[in-house]
Amino acid sequence: EAQVTQNPRYLITVTGKKLTVTCSQNMNHEYMSWYRQDPGLGLRQIYYSMNVEVTDKGDVPEGYKVSRKEKRNFPLILESPSPNQTSLYFCASRGLTGQPQHFGDGTRLSIL
Amino acid sequence: QKEVEQNSGPLSVPEGAIASLNCTYSDRGSQSFFWYRQYSGKSPELIMFIYSNGDKEDGRFTAQLNKASQYVSLLIRDSQPSDSATYLCAVDNAGNNRKLIWGLGTSLAVNP
């Protein structure tokens, strides 16, 4: 089954404690993205990757890092999380130009 | 700034009626258009995509595209309470072919 898998689904943590949200896709897609979604603000792209070792900032990259060492994986790293990063996060992947985007199930992140 | 605009709603329709959701976009070069459905706290789910002017039908859903007027719409026939969700319009960024520009979504409530 074609899917995007992200983990964990839920995480409660404290300010400053480094965390990683993993994302993996099995569709051999080149393009992968991370989004955060907040009430009234919609989906905002954090980072994206066009291919292995090629990443770039999206619209709200501050406080986040990513890496793309393998085509299937695109982890999101919060080196020093802060409460304003409490949000619902989605990983997504996309194949050829014009094809739809596939989303993971989301990660609900709460930072106290 | 490339934008996608949707009426936030809520749009309320009785069960069995036709729900009409609209989206306008600013990038005249956009070629691919997508409608996603999102239930509260869940990930966006692809409903329809359309590339050419005119109508595209899939079951109870019809997507309509008018590139000259820069709008795309989604019609839901025989609306069901299970259609109650937020509907997101997404448009390809003509300058960066993999990035989607997202509207904030229209909330639809189908009343039994």
Image (spheres, rainbow, N blue to C red):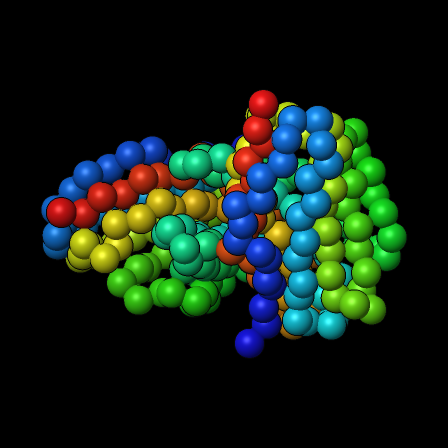
Of residues B93 and B66, which is closer to you in this image? B66
Relative to the observer, which residue lies in front, A105 or B3? B3
Residue at point 35% right, 45% down?
A: A88
- In the image, taking residue A54 as reference, residue B101 lies left or right, namely right
Q: Quadrant of the N terminus of chain B?
A: bottom right
Q: Residue at x 73, y 72 (%)?
A: B28
Left or right relative to B61: residue A55: left
- In the rendered image, residue A9, in percent from the top left (x then y), is placed at 34, 33
Q: What residue is drawn where x is 83% and y is 43%?
A: B56
Q: Quadrant of the C terminus of chain B?
A: top right
Against A45, is B61 above or below? above
Where residue A10 appears, x then y in whole percent?
A: 29, 34
Q: Is residue A87 left or right of residue A52?
A: left
Quarter where residue B24 is shown: bottom right
The answer to whether residue B78 is above or below residue A25 is above
Task: Spot the residue most to the right.
Answer: B54
| Front in this rendered view, residue A71 or A56 | A56
Residue at image point 66% right, 57% down:
B23
x, y percent for residue A3: 54, 33
